[in-house]
């Protein structure tokens, strides 16, 4: 198959190694380009763009008229929308899917084993995307819960910042385990309210990706939280991360989404305070721990 990857970042390049191992023909396009490369006629587009650049980039590129698989994890700040919705709105393309799961780009390039989930509302379409990527070193599963898979991949970025802050504050392993558990509960609540299935968040795009990114310094979001907890201002942290920290704008998007009740997102609320309102991380921790007792 002829595959065009829209996005030349580390993740797009990592995915290209998987596609090429299966002898697909790969062409790249960058979000800095003004249109598709000459002779562009792919069978499928894989999109690996920073989420906040997706809409403006798609407006510059004519609709390809082929299925599109999103590799991007995040929510648009201004609308709170998932990437698949943006693709459908701008390109009028309903054959869309999303890939998510615990996958660091460097390990993918190195050929280390990894697993992920590919979601599309249409099961057959999910299977078509799966055939482009599935191989022994990159085991893929399919799912029809596109909302849940996209939200899992987006929301875990927020909670990875929290994991990094927990490490930076040296709160201990008990705190980290409890935090990750409550983050999973919170992202599940948010997802279900948006129409996702609860069980999706117990899978690769939810718990799997959360465990990876909330505990590892390979994660830019984790490193962001770690540095913030050590007193480094956000404006100095972001340029040092060598890439986009999707958890920062995604926190903003979820905080601004008034359709999500405040009592459903206490961790998001405190992280927003740290990121955008100069709340000291230790104060945010106290705010969380001092809430009234409740059932699990």
Image (cartoon, grey):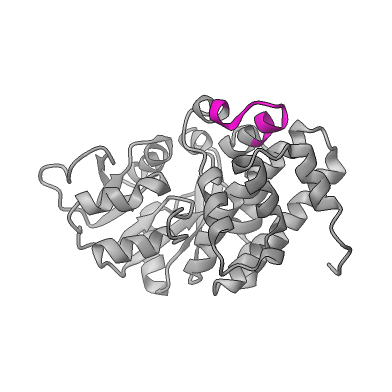
Vertical placement of 206 versus 166: above or below? below
Q: Would you place residue 243 above or below residue 283 in this image?
A: above
Residue sitting at 20 percent across and 59 percent down?
A: 63
Chief secondary structure of the magenta portion = helix
Say which residue appears at 43% left-offset and 55% top-offset.
78
Lateral position of residue 29 relative to residue 179, left or right: left
Residue 182 image position (x, y, % from top left) = 76, 57
In the drawing, does residue 128 fall left or right of residue 180? left
Figure label count? 0
> In percent of the image, x 87 and y 45: which residue is there?
174
Residue 229, quarter of picture = top right
Q: Position of residue 290 (x, y in %)?
A: 86, 53
Residue 131, position as x, y percentages in the image: 38, 59
Q: Which residues are magenta?
A: 225-236
4 on left or right of 35: right
Outermost residue toward the front in this view: 277
Task: Name the residue rendered at 30%, 46% in the picture.
Answer: 5
Is residue 153 visible in the rendered image? The answer is no
Q: Nearer the viewer, residue 137 or 198?
A: 198
Left/right placement of residue 14 relative to residue 252 reads left
């Amino acid at each position: 198959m002829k595959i065009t990857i829209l996005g030349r970042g580390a993740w797009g390049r990592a995915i290209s190694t998987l596609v090429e191992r299966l002898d697909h023909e790969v062409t790249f396009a960058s979000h800095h380009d003004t249109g598709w490369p000459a002779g562009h006629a792919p069978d499928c587009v894989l999109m690996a763009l920073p989420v906040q650049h997706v809409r403006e980039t798609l407006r510059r590129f004519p609709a390809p008229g082929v299925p599109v698989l999103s590799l991007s994890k995040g929510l648009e700040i201004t609308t709170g929308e998932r990437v698949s919705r943006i693709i459908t709105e701008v390109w009028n393309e309903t054959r869309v899917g999303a890939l998510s799961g615990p996958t660091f780009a460097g390990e993918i390039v190195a050929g280390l084993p990894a697993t992920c989930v590919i979601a599309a509302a249409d099961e057959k379409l999910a299977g078509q995307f799966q055939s482009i990527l599935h191989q022994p070193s990159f085991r893929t599963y399919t799912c029809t819960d596109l909302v849940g898979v996209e939200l899992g991949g987006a929301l875990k970025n927020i909670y990875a910042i929290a994991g990094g802050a927990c490490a930076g504050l040296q709160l201990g392993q008990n705190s980290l385990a409890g935090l990750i558990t409550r983050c999973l509960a919170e992202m599940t609540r948010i997802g279900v309210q948006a129409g996702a299935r609860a069980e999706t968040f117990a899978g690769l795009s939810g718990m799997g990706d959360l465990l990876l990114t909330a505990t590892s310094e390979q994660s830019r979001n984790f490193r962001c939280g770690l540095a913030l907890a050590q007193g480094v201002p956000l404006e100095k942290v972001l340029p040092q991360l060598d890439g986009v920290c999707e958890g920062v704008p995604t926190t903003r998007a979820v905080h601004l989404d008034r359709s999500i009740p405040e009592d459903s997102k206490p961790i998001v609320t405190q992280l927003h305070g740290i990121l955008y309102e100069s709340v000291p991380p230790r104060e945010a921790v106290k705010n969380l721990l001092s809430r009234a007792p409740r059932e699990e």
